[in-house]
Amino acid sequence: MAARVDERLAQVFVELADTLVAGFDLMEFLHMLTERCVELLEVDAAGLLLADGGGTLRLVAASTEQARVAELFQIQNDEGPCLDCYRSGQVVISRDIGAEQAAARWPRFAAAAREMGFAGVHAIPMRLRDQVIGTLNLFRAAPDGMDLAVARAAQALVDVATIGILQERAVHQQEVVAGQLQIALNSRVLIEQAKGVLAERLRITPDEAFIVLRRYARDHNHQLTELAGDVIRGTTPIIRGS
């Protein structure tokens, strides 16, 4: 990777570390992670799946609407590289989702991914020792894979995210982990609903609505999940540019 990219990667690690210690907002942290992956790792979209208390994968963050749909498609159809990654605890790479091998392994997902504009997937397990809590999934529009340096950077970002989610587990271990994950899952539902409300109200796309929501939360020092609830209830009016 070029020196400029290495410098930016170092800055992102500092940014993520700051987020972990200063008023930790799990949903903001996870969405920031997907955005920084797209910025730094030569991918077109990123999604993040976490397992709930019963071990079922749930979508908690995605950098674009297409990535969100791709992740939900895998969950709903119980098929895809991201699910295989979680179940095996190993990195799963499909450099060309349209290739015969990928189409045979994930026939429904391969066809759907191509329709969404994705040609390659790099799925990385979020794990600490033997415990796998989810996956970070990187999507590419071109049918080629990451080089080794980029793949290592991706793994490093995943490790930081995993530590962030599990940072309090030393106190109550599984109870804390399950609670953090459930909060993230519940928060994701509120945020998706708020995106829909804003998109309809402001006549913009869901992706644009999420940008407006996050900007307002940052500018007014609100927790993202709390703001989403206010938007749904209509107690916090938001206009574009506010």
Image: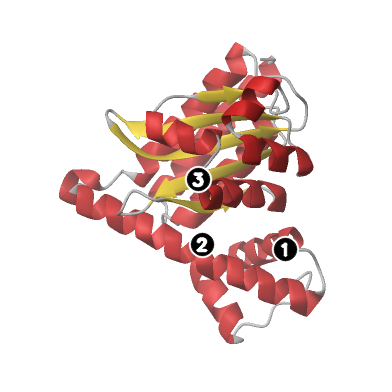
Mark 3 vs mark 2, foreground winner is 3
| Pointer 2 or 1: first along the chain | 2
Q: What residue does disc 2 label?
A: 188
Residue 63, above or below 202: above
Q: Alpha-carbon distance for marks 2 and 1?
A: 14 Å
What residue sits 72% from the left and 63% below the top? 206
What residue sits 33% from the left and 48% below the top? 55
Q: Is residue 18 left or right of residue 228?
A: left
Q: Are marks 3 and 2 in contact (CB under 8 Å)?
A: no
Q: Are marks 3 and 1 in contact (CB under 8 Å)?
A: no
What residue sits 69% from the left and 28% below the top? 97
What residue sits 76% from the left and 79% below the top? 201
Locate the C terminus by quadrant.
bottom right
Closer to the camera in the image, 46 or 86: 86
**Residue 114 percent across, percent down from the top left:** 75, 37
Three-letter amino acid code of the residue under disc 3? Asp
* Residue 61 visible in rendering: yes
